[in-house]
Structure formats: structure tokens, C-alpha cells
Amino acid sequence: MSERVTPQEVMKALSAVEDPVARRDIVALGYVKNVEVGTNGVVLTLQFPASASSVQGELVVAIKRAVQQLGVEEVQIHQLASPPAPTRGSALIPGVKHTIAVASGKGGVGKSTVAANLASALQQQGVAVGLMDTDVYGPSIPVLLGSKEQPRVVEGKLAAPVEYGIKVMSMAYFLPKDEAVIWRGPMLHKTIQQFLGDVRWGELDYLVIDLPPGTGDIQLSLSQTIPLTGAVIVSTPQDLALAVAWKAIAMFNKMNVPILGIIENMSYYVCPHCGERAEIFGHGGAREAAKKLGLAFLGEIPLDPVIRAESDAGRPVALDSSSPHYAAYQNVARAVREQAERVGREAPPISFE
Amino acid sequence: MWPKSIKLNTPNHTVWVEWSDGHRSAYSYPYLRDHCPCATCTSSHRGGATASPSPNPLPMLGAQALRPLRAELVGRYALQIFWSDGHSSGIYTFDYLRGLCPCEQCRPFPAHGA
């Protein structure tokens, strides 16, 4: 070697080497921990993250070549062990992109029906969807989807029944028809964790989570166990239901869960005989409330005996392209996806150094 | 307020948090352990902000040995730290953690243990 290179020159040469996975240069990514220039050549200390393990070999070759091009003959490389991969809160369901909770303050506003139809509409739009029924006291999702299958245990994990292309999990699968769940909080917490961690959800774009009414144990457990993408609030237009919906919104605000918007269910009723529109619970109340709160209004679903009949028969109305509800739910699904992408605030990575 | 990243640096006994507004907070391990917001450590039900001056009067480990073994997110609103002294019931909400920032800008008068 005629003349010694400086560590700065080495760093400069290394900054031309790019990690093909991260698509940034290895200096900016912090892989180069130390550069030592000695009489015999250059000693590099490198540390690759676990995410670069697949390209580590080719990176080492490229790094050697880059330094050799400076006229250095001897390039020694020390590698430090990869630090543990950063953990994110959703380690329980690593393949799920978005988790959407469907909530309301009050019971009986049609949360489960909306959740089942929202999942169906999402599925129609070509995204991979799961539907988790966390209402352990009154599980109704399997009935709404006409689910006859049972979850099976495959290699130590539960394989969820698939209905209309949607992976489904519910407490209803584990209970004889006329038996009830009579549990206190800790059991509920365990159930939520098992529904998330012990079920093979696989790769999903959306996991729609149907919540029981209120602001209790299940809502709390869910918000603590996974970083929810957001919550969708279902309400009827009447003031009473909206007043309780505010409480659900307040709870999610406390837990830092973004509210994706409000859906007005039972928005109005069109008489099948005379075609006249009757606004049984009033109309537009949820839209106004959303406006007041600065939240997105995701759509309105009219009240229709067809919904009741089809739901009892296990056929989501959102799948029948001849029904007026098809379009309504398609719009709701589009609005939910837009909002989910918009809030797409990722959970912060936690790393050890 | 939302952390963009959380780094636990054991050689420096420091937890680094970068916040969504760009602010960076550095918390020493003993400082965080002393400000554990759990009910046992605060010895009252008034919440973490009123932590008594000596929440950990009989430390099991010296300052050098005290470190987080593990840290996890709680939903999307808090950080839970599993300390090497066996304690793990403190849930540091992001709001609480942000308010705890010991830097001069955030605290002209340094808090106890900072």
C-alpha cells in the first residue's frame, strides 16, 4: 500500500454501498460501527440488523470491493451479533395490516350486523378479511354469516372457519347453543388474547373486530393487547344512542385509538307498500354528531325488514348486488379503507441497543 | 403526543424517546424506575404524577444492575417495562412519559432523581 487511506475516505466509499432491502446506504443505516486503518489494511466492524440477514452475504462482498477500490489490499471484517429485531405491539398477529374495532356505546344499534356486512363489503373489494366476534356474552357473528363449520386445531393453533371468503372467530363456536358465558374480567382478557394469538389469522389486510356494547373489560383488553388501527362507531340517529356513543369515543380517545368515523344505522325506513320514507329514529343525527366532533361520517344504512330476514338466514345483505344495501355498504367499506390508510400511524418500534 | 421511536440503551442506562413533535427525551433507568406509575410504587391512588420522593426505598439492585429486561407496547397508548429487579406492573402512558421528560426545556427545575 503506497499511501494510507483515512477512515473518512473509507466511510465515504462505504456510503456508496446500498442495502437492497432497506434501499438506503449502509452508513446511513448505521451498519458500520467502526473503521480502523492499520499498517496492514482496514478493519471494519459491522453490525447487520436481523432484517438484513438475507442480503448479508452480498453486502459483505460489496463492502470489501468498495474498500479495495481505494487501493487497500487487506480488508478485515468483524461482525457483531444482530440486535434483537424491534418489537411492535402486534406481535400476536404479525400478518394483519389493519385492525378495525366496530363499537357503539349502546346495545341494539346493529353493531354486529354492520360488522358482518362491512367485512363482506371489504371482501367484495378484493382485500383479505377476518372477522373476530369479541361479544362473548351474546356472540352473533356465526349466525349472521350462516356459519356451520367449526374451528379445527391444526398444529397447535385454531384454524378459523371461512364464510363467504372471510375468516371468522367467535365464542359461539365453543358453546352449546343454549349455554351462557358467565365470566368475570380476567377470563375475558384471556379470551381476547387467545382469539388474537391462538388463531391462524395469517395474512390479512383487515381484521374487523365486533365489540360488545359499552366501555368495559373487553374493550379495555383489546385496546391494551394490540395497537388498533382505529375504531368505527355505530349509532342510530336518535339522541339517546348518540349520547352513549360519545362515551365510546371518549374511551378510545383515552387509549389513543383513532376514531375512523361514525356509521348511522337504521337511518330511515322506506315503506315497501307506498314507498314513503319514514325516519323512525330521526335522521342525520349521526352525521351532525360526526361534524360536531370533527370525525368522518362513513355512511348511512337504511332500516329494512330484508336485513332482518337475510341476517337470520345467514346471508349478509352487503353481498346481494341487487339490494340497495349493497351500494350503501360498498361506500362504507371504501370510506373505512380511506380512513384506515389516512390514520395509518404505525406503532413506534422499541429497540434495544 | 406519540413516540416515533423508543430506544433502550443499556450501555448508557438510558431510554431514548423521539416524539412526534421532534422532541427527544432521555430518561435514565433509575429515574424511570423511581417514577414507576403503578399503584404500589405511588403508594396512593392519585396516579403517577404524585409519586412520593422515595418510591423504591429498598432497591434490590444497584444502579448498575438495574435495567429493563424487556419492554412492550400496551395497545397504542403506553409502554410497559419489565425491570431486572422483577417489577413490571408500571404502565407508562405516553402522556405520562412525555410529562416526565427531565430535559431543561421541559423542567427548568430538575425533578427528584433526574
Image (tube, grey):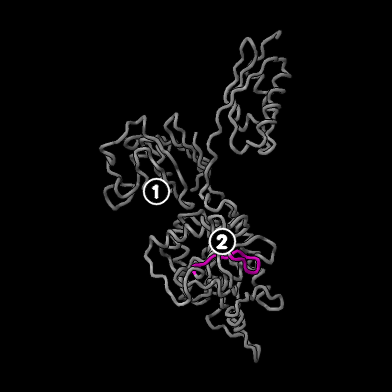
Q: Residue at x 60, y 64 (%)?
A: A167
Res B112 visible: yes
Percent of width and height locating residue B68: 41, 38
Q: Residue A260 carries which label?
A: 2
Answer yes or no: are tags 1 and 2 on the same subunit: no
Q: If the image is split into quadrants, where does the C terminus of chain B sit?
A: top left
Q: Which image quadrant for residue A316? A: bottom right
Residue type at mark 1?
Ile
Q: Which residue is drawn at 50% across and 57% down?
A: A257
Q: Dominant secondary structure of the magenta stretch?
A: strand
- Return the chain for callout 1: B
Q: Is residue A166 magenta?
A: yes
The magenta span reads A161-171
| Label 2 secondary element | strand
Position of residue A347 in the picture relative to residue A178 (left or right): right
Percent of width and height locating residue A282: 54, 80
Other-residue count near label 1 (Cα within 10 Å), few / some / many at <14 / 14–19 / ≥20: many
Pointer 1: what residue? Answer: B91
Res A243 visible: no
Other-residue count near label 2 (Cα within 10 Å), few / some / many at <14 / 14–19 / ≥20: many
A147, above or below B89, in the image: below
The residues bearing labels 1 and 2 have C-alpha atoms spaced at a distance of: 26 Å
Q: Which mark is residue A220?
A: none
Residue type at mark 2?
Leu
Q: Which of the two residues, B90 or A59, is positioned nearer the viewer here?
A: A59
